[in-house]
Amino acid sequence: MNKIIISTHGNLARELVNTARLFASTDNVIAVGLYPDTELMKYKSELEKLISDVKDTNILILTDIFGGTPFNVITQICKNLKLKTKVEIISGVNLPMLLEVLLRKDSVQDICELKQIAYNVGKNSIRDFFGELNESN
């Protein structure tokens, strides 16, 4: 079984999870938002606890922006903690990516494979309607 942590700026993580509930189970999914009034050390401590408390399962962490504060805090935590579990991190979270992860998180045991699935679906879900329409004509 894999655990999913989504950490983003503002309400994005929470709302992605709320929307995903329309399509799939969100068991073992945690949403953490960073808000303008959030004290950075409190945010970091919350994430450290969430990550270090996980035992006997792998963690896939999805963030919104590569190089953004949620991403930077999480990568720093993962570099500094002596984790007993495998952790993978990917940025650019979007709804298609999250849905695919939710649908496959229990059947795909290899967290690296789940990360690759998330990456591919996230990237391939960005489409140009008129560009594709013109290509087919």
Image (spheres, rainbow, N blue to C red):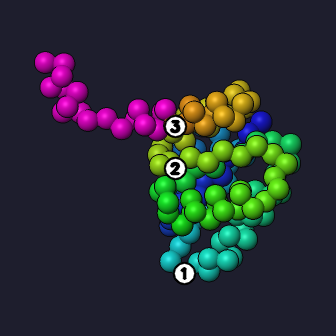
**Residue at the spot 73% in from the left edge and 71% down from the top edge:** 45
Residue 134 image point, x, y percent? 15, 25
Report how far apart the C-alphas of labels 2 and 3 lie in the structure: 9 Å
Report how far apart the C-alphas of labels 3 and 1 lie in the structure: 31 Å
Image depth: mark 2 or mark 1 in front: 2
Residue type for callout 3: Tyr
Image depth: mark 3 or mark 1 in front: 3
Q: Main secondary structure of the magenta part?
A: helix
Residue 118 image point, x, y percent? 55, 36
Q: Which residue is mark 1?
A: 37
Question: Are the two marked residues, 2 and 3, in contact with CB atoms closer than 8 angstroms?
Answer: no
Q: Which residue is mark 2?
A: 91
**Residue at the spot 65% in from the left edge and 71% down from the top edge:** 43
Q: Which SS class for mark 1?
A: loop
The boundaries of the magenta stretch are 120-137
First of labels 2, 3 by sequence position: 2
First of labels 2, 1 by sequence position: 1
Say whether residue 128 is left or right of residue 4.
left
Say whether residue 113 is left or right of residue 130.
right
Asked if residue 128 is among those painted magenta in the image, a careful observer would answer yes
| Of 65 and 37, the residue lying toward us | 65
Residue 124 image point, x, y percent? 41, 32
**Residue at the spot 20% in from the left edge and 31% down from the top edge:** 131
Q: Which residue is mark 3?
A: 119
Residue type for callout 2: Ser
